[in-house]
Amino acid sequence: MRNTVFAFGVGIIAAGAAFAADVPRIVALGDSLTAGYGLPASDGFVPQLQAWLDANGAVAQVVNAGVSGDTTAGGAARLAWSLDGGAQALIVNLGGNDMLRGLDPSVARANLTQILDGARAQGLPVLLVGMIAPGNYGVAYKAQFDAIYPDLAAQFGVLLVPAFFAPIAGADGGIDLAFMQSDGIHPDAGGVARIVEAMGPKVLELLELTK
């Protein structure tokens, strides 16, 4: 996965110019799944979520703070400047790269705790998006990793989407590759649409918490 910090920064500036100052800003902090890796600009997670909110009459600006290849450590390191332009809510979708690299789940938990602490310090409501480790990582690793998201959601009292990929799961419980790009890691435009459709109501709940 390629690092796209420059593009991410330009995206925030461009998006900011298109919305009035009093429109609630939801910062989507994440990795390539948030950044829209491998997709045309209009088909990524953030543009599709923005379109879903618009279609459902919600007034909000979703800011793309996704950086391809980022881990929870990277997200924690850039939280402050990701929120620098002002934010009323935060979506956190990180941990997939920690898992792919087989990093210790306790490290991901600590980094996500740091992010949630930072959001709490600013009084921001949060939607935490979970990841589920596949079985080939071993029973112990999977149990430790999968527990991170529900545990932290309960600890911090934040909203939770238990599993990002759940809306495109196949009959066997694994991800349906019909909704994935050729790399088998990132959803295609149709997969993103399903994910956004399922997550949208939770984002509306998040928006209610900004009022």
Image: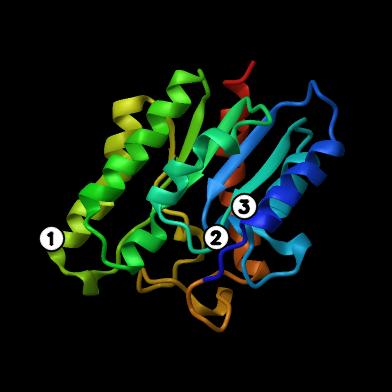
Please rate how many residues cluster around mark 1, counting C-alpha atoms within 10 Å: few if below 14, some from 14 to 19, many from 20: few
Give the secondary structure at mark 1: helix
Q: CA distance from mark 1 to mark 3?
A: 31 Å
- Looking at the rendered structure, the kind of residue marked 2 is Leu
Q: Which of disc 2 and disc 3 is earlier in sequence?
A: 2
Please rate how many residues cluster around mark 2, counting C-alpha atoms within 10 Å: few if below 14, some from 14 to 19, many from 20: many
Q: CA distance from mark 2 to mark 1?
A: 26 Å
- Residue 40 image label: none
Question: Percent x, y for residue 140?
Answer: 12, 60
- Residue 33 image label: 2
Residue at 51%, 42% (x, y): give it. 78
- Residue 196 image label: 3
Give above or below for 40 relative to 76.
Answer: below
Give the secondary structure at mark 3: helix
Q: Which of disc 1 and disc 2 is earlier in sequence?
A: 2
- Given the current orientation, which residue lies at the most extreme bottom position? 182
Q: Which of disc 3 and disc 1 is earlier in sequence?
A: 1
Give above or below for 190 relative to 66.
Answer: below
Residue at 31%, 35% (x, y): give it. 152
Residue 45 occupies which quadrant of the picture? bottom right
Residue at 44%, 71% (x, y): give it. 175
How many numbered marks are there? 3
What quarter of the picture does the C terminus occupy?
top right
Mark in the foreground, 1 or 3: 1
- Looking at the rendered structure, the kind of residue marked 1 is Ala
Question: Percent x, y for residue 35?
Answer: 62, 58
